[in-house]
Every structure is written in C-alpha cells, then in structure tokens.
C-alpha cells in the first residue's frame, strides 16, 4: 500500500451559483465520505481551503492575489487509492486527481490548536521539484510546522501539449500556523521555495 493525496480543484463560479440547499447537501456528502474513511482507519489527513479570492501566489519576483482559475479547494490524504471505494462528492465541472505521495508528515489534528493554519501549495515544473525539495528540507519553522507532503509527478501523458516537463504542477502541500496571511507571504517570499517555483497560500477552514 502507498499513501495518496486526492486533490480537488473546484469551479468556484459553479459552486457560487448553487443554491444554499444544494451546497448543504454537497457538504453533507463530503462529510460522509471522509467519515467512512476515518471509520475504516484509512484517513490520514484532510482539509478544505478558503476561496481563492482570499489567496496569494508568491513568486521570486512578484506576488499575485486571487481569485485563481481551477484552484485547489480541498485535499484528502488516504493510505491507499484502493480505499477510495466511492467517488469524492463534487460538481460536474470540478477536477479530481489522485497523486501518490513520495513522503509526508500528516497532522490531522492541526486545526484543534489556537491560531490560523495556512496551506502552502508548491507549484513548479517537474524538473525542479527535486531541487526545491533539497533546498527547503530544513527551512520550516519548527514552532509553526503543521504537517505536509511531497508528491510524485503525474505519470499520465497528454496528447494536446505542452509536454508535462514544461507544465506547472503541484509538487506538494505543507501547512504552517501563522498569525496572518501577510506573515505567511513574508515568510514565503524569503524562502527557497520561490527561487525555483512558487507558493500558493490559502487559509484552511476549521473543521
């Protein structure tokens, strides 16, 4: 068995167009989905990000503010893709991806402590992910670190280009407890993550 991360990219406009009753049903279905994994002892971590309009992408030479197209809206970390016996509840326009983990430290109780938790999505080309990893392994502030993971590169080739090597992918996700998104942006801008790639920063909803 190997750990996998289910990445949920949402069509935020489509979600905003849903009625409150429809969204309530979707949230309830998602709660049942994660509860079933937890009951089987196979849920290692999961969470949901605040809307991308509240997010920031930090590059080496600039900072971009959301909203973003097809943002990462939620994640679900399980110990084996085979345990996803039911599809993750989503709208028709949402995109789901299952990515195997290379390594990771889950902290499923991270939101039970006081303070805000920010997710940092590592974005870059596949060719630089090893370099980013090597240069950032010891860079996390110990008192703020709240778990994270590194993902294997996608294995599926595309026929419509550009080639995978030239595309930006999500290389991993990690979490830090910080006072504000401004503090998170300052930390990100001074990190080695943005020398070769970028970080998208979004606060997690508290479960």
Image (cartoon, helix red, strand yellow):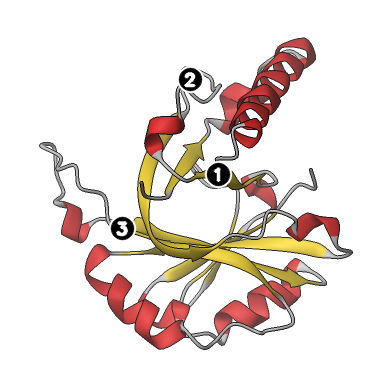
Q: Please state the horizontal and vertical placement of residue 100, each as a whole percent of the image.
A: 35, 50
Name above or below for residue 6 compared with residue 87.
below
Of the numbered discs 2 and 1, the one sitting upstream in the chain is: 1
Q: Secondary structure at mark 2?
A: loop
Determine crowd level at label 3: few under 14, some 14-19, many 20+ residues with C-alpha closer than 10 A: some
Measured in 3D between alpha carbons, the distance from the residue under mark 3 to the one under mark 1, in whole angstroms, is 15 Å
In this rendering, position of residue 202 left or right of residue 91: right
Q: Which residue is mark 3?
A: 152
Q: Please state the horizontal and vertical placement of residue 102, each as a whole percent of the image.
A: 36, 62
Q: Secondary structure at mark 3?
A: loop
- Residue 105 or residue 63, whichever sits in front: 105
Numbered label attached to residue 75: 1
At 59% from the left and 32% from the top, the residue drawn is 40
In this rendering, position of residue 56 left or right of residue 50: left
Measured in 3D between alpha carbons, the distance from the residue under mark 2 to the one under mark 1, in whole angstroms, is 15 Å
At 49% from the left and 38% from the top, the residue drawn is 9
Of the numbered discs 2 and 3, the one sitting upstream in the chain is: 2
Quadrant of the image containing the C terminus: top right
In this rendering, position of residue 136 left or right of residue 203: left
Q: Secondary structure at mark 1?
A: strand
Q: Are marks 3 and 1 in contact (CB under 8 Å)?
A: no
Number of numbered discs present? 3
Residue 122 visible in image: no
Between disc 2 and disc 3, the foreground one is: 2
Name above or below for residue 94 compared with residue 67.
above
Of the numbered discs 3 and 1, the one sitting upstream in the chain is: 1
Determine crowd level at label 1: few under 14, some 14-19, many 20+ residues with C-alpha closer than 10 A: many
In this rendering, position of residue 89 left or right of residue 123: right
Q: Which residue is mark 2?
A: 86
- Residue 135 or residue 147, whichever sits in front: 147
């Amino acid at each position: 068995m190997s750990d996998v991360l289910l990445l949920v990219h949402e069509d935020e406009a489509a979600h905003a167009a849903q009625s409150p009753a429809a969204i309530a049903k979707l949230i309830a279905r998602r709660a049942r989905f994660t509860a079933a994994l937890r009951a089987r002892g196979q849920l290692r971590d999961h969470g949901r990000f605040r809307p991308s309009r509240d997010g920031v992408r930090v590059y080496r030479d600039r900072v971009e503010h959301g909203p973003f197209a097809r943002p990462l809206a939620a994640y679900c970390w399980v110990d084996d893709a085979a345990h996803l016996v039911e599809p993750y509840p989503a709208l028709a326009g949402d995109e789901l991806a299952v990515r195997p983990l290379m390594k990771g430290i889950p902290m499923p109780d991270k939101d039970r402590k006081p303070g805000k938790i920010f997710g940092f999505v590592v974005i870059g080309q596949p060719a630089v992910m090893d370099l980013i990893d090597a240069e950032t392994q010891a860079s996390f502030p110990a008192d703020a670190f709240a778990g994270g993971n590194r993902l294997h590169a996608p294995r599926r080739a595309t026929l419509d280009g550009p080639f995978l090597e030239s595309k930006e992918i999500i290389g991993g996700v990690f979490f830090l407890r910080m006072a504000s998104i401004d503090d998170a942006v300052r930390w990100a801008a001074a990190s080695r993550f943005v020398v070769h790639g970028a970080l998208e920063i979004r606060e997690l909803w508290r479960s």
